[in-house]
Image (cartoon, rainbow, N blue to C red):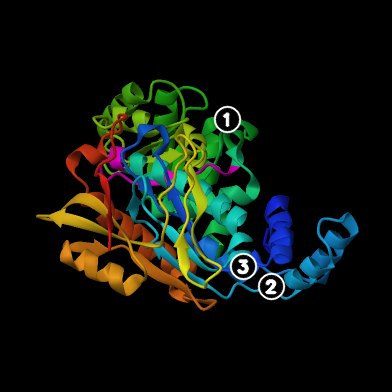
């Protein structure tokens, strides 16, 4: 799981570009890279910035030890001058970024990396790897929690993705509004509440359902959640309620994991109420996505457990973020805007600051200001009444630790709730459509 270095979580061409630029002298030119999306995946109405804390962890650990340098030498990846540079590498530049949990739109400069070309170039792959994965999961989580209308959503997708991605996905899901995870490492690393009781195998290993329920309640107390659809749901509910009462209380919840969940939820709720188990809750699982959750909105469901669709971005496993050079130092020492002109892949050059314009508390537009520095950009944002969106994440190589760790995850979740709530009503729709607000570029 934890790595001694993140420096090898990169593409070879980052090092070959480094080598050639060291030889040409361009490696030491001051440069500005920007992370943004040209479009929102799948015609969604907004994206969600997630993974910022993990990016900062990756930057902190991005070093080349003797072992990495020796391997690169043995493989002939780069030559001696480049190996010497890598041996002493530490990122010493600046990073500005949207607060984690903030909504973003096409053209939003969600992360800006300033430094020499060499030091900023090397971070490209790992930064995109983290942000594209985590932002995709957080966007799916946000849509699911919107569809849930306040009912708790629980992350349980570890067995449907890579073991390290499972931890990252749990973290991103919480940024998007989920309240707990089944993954213990996510609980340990990020302070996320963990949950989980039993699978069908636990019922099947016992001689009968009654014995299985009795064993679980004895071990975990009557407030536990019993999985009641291994055999017959109606009989399972009856046995589950009885098992809890034999141990002195009312059953905490029943879980439904198959069949027509809407119809079953109504049937089970009526049965529970008829048995006097009015406080027993119903949680549903079984390959849910935002559309299935929305369809369950009228059913008497108390919480949702989501796995596969969540950790795979609900069909869109990347946020389509790119990492592009937008400004660099010229031969005369002055900064020069640079941009791609490729068809369908054009970029907007220059350093930028971003803000959001509101009217009566509702977001109206994303304002992106091309400018020389933060101060001049801030003046333009103020003139337009726009709330600044970027925060200093790294300054002169020093990482702002408040954006890492468990507290940062909780802050990101709170930020997302506020950011999403401020979108126009159309922005909350699950259907494909235009971004919730337009992005406008101006010059400072």
Looking at the rendered structure, the secondary structure element under dot 2 is loop
| Residue designated by label 1 | 208
Counting from the top left corner in percent of width and height, residue 430 is at 30, 33
**Residue topped by disc 3:** 119
Residue 51 position within the rendered picture, expressed as x and y whole percent measured from the top left: 49, 56
- Asked if residue 84 is positioned above or below residue 315 in the image, the reply reads below
Q: Find residue 211 and report its image quarter.
A: top right
Magenta stretch: includes residue 10: no
Which image quadrant is residue 351 in?
bottom left
Q: Which residues are magenta?
A: 146-158
Q: Earlier in the sequence, mark 2 or mark 1?
A: 2
Instruction: Using the image as rendered, state which of residue 147 and residue 327 is in the foreground.
Output: 327
Query: What's the residue at 53%, 31% (across, down)?
Result: 209
Q: Determine which of the numbered discs, if any, sits on residue 372 in the image.
A: none
Q: From the top left corner, tell me how far across and down residue 126 is, in percent.
A: 60, 56
Reading the image, the residue beneath label 2 is 89
Which is nearer the N-term, disc 3 or disc 1? Answer: 3
Residues at circles 3 and 2 in contact by the CB criterion of under 8 Å? yes
**Residue name at image x 72 percent, y 76 percent:** 88
């Amino acid at each position: 799981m934890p790595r001694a270095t993140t420096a090898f979580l990169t593409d070879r061409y980052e090092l070959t570009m480094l080598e050639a630029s060291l030889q040409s002298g361009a490696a030491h030119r001051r440069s500005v890279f920007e992370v943004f999306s040209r479009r929102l995946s799948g015609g969604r109405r907004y994206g969600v910035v997630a993974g910022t804390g993990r990016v900062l962890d990756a930057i902190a650990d991005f070093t080349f030890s003797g072992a990495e340098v020796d391997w690169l030498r043995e493989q002939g990846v780069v030559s001696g001058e480049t190996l010497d540079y890598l041996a002493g590498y530490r990122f010493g530049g600046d990073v500005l970024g949207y607060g984690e949990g903030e909504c973003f739109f096409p053209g939003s400069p969600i992360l800006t990396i300033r430094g020499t070309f060499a030091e900023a170039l090397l971070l490209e792959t790992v930064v995109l790897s983290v942000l594209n994965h985590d932002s995709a999961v957080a966007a799916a989580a946000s849509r699911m929690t919107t569809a849930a209308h306040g009912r708790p959503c629980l992350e349980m997708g570890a067995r449907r993705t890579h073991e390290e991605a499972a931890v990252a996905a749990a973290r991103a899901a919480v940024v998007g509004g989920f309240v707990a995870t089944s993954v213990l490492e996510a609980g340990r690393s990020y302070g996320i509440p963990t949950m989980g009781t039993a699978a069908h195998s636990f019922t099947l290993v016992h001689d009968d359902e009654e014995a299985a329920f009795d064993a679980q309640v004895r071990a975990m107390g009557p407030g536990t959640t019993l999985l009641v659809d291994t055999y017959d749901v109606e009989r399972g509910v009856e046995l589950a309620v009885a098992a809890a009462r034999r141990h002195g209380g009312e059953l905490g919840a029943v879980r439904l994991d198959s069949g027509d969940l809407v119809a079953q939820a109504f049937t089970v709720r009526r049965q529970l109420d008829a048995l006097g188990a009015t406080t027993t809750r119903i949680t549903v699982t079984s390959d849910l996505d935002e559309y299935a959750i929305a369809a369950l909105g009228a059913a008497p469901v108390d919480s949702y457990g989501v796995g596969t669709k969540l950790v795979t971005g609900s069909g869109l496993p990347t946020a389509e973020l790119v990492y592009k050079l937008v400004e660099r130092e010229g031969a005369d020492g002055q900064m020069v805007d640079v941009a791609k002109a490729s068809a369908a892949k054009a970029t907007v050059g220059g350093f930028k600051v971003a803000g959001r314009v509101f009217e009566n508390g509702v977001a109206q537009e994303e304002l992106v200001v091309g400018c020389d520095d933060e101060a001049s950009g801030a003046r333009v944002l103020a003139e337009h009444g726009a709330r600044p969106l970027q925060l200093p994440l790294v300054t002169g190589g020093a990482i702002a630790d408040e954006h890492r760790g468990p507290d940062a995850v909780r802050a990101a979740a709170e930020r997302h709730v506020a950011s999403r709530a401020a979108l126009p009503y159309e922005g909350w729709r699950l259907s494909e459509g235009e971004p919730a607000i337009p992005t406008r570029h101006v010059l400072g």
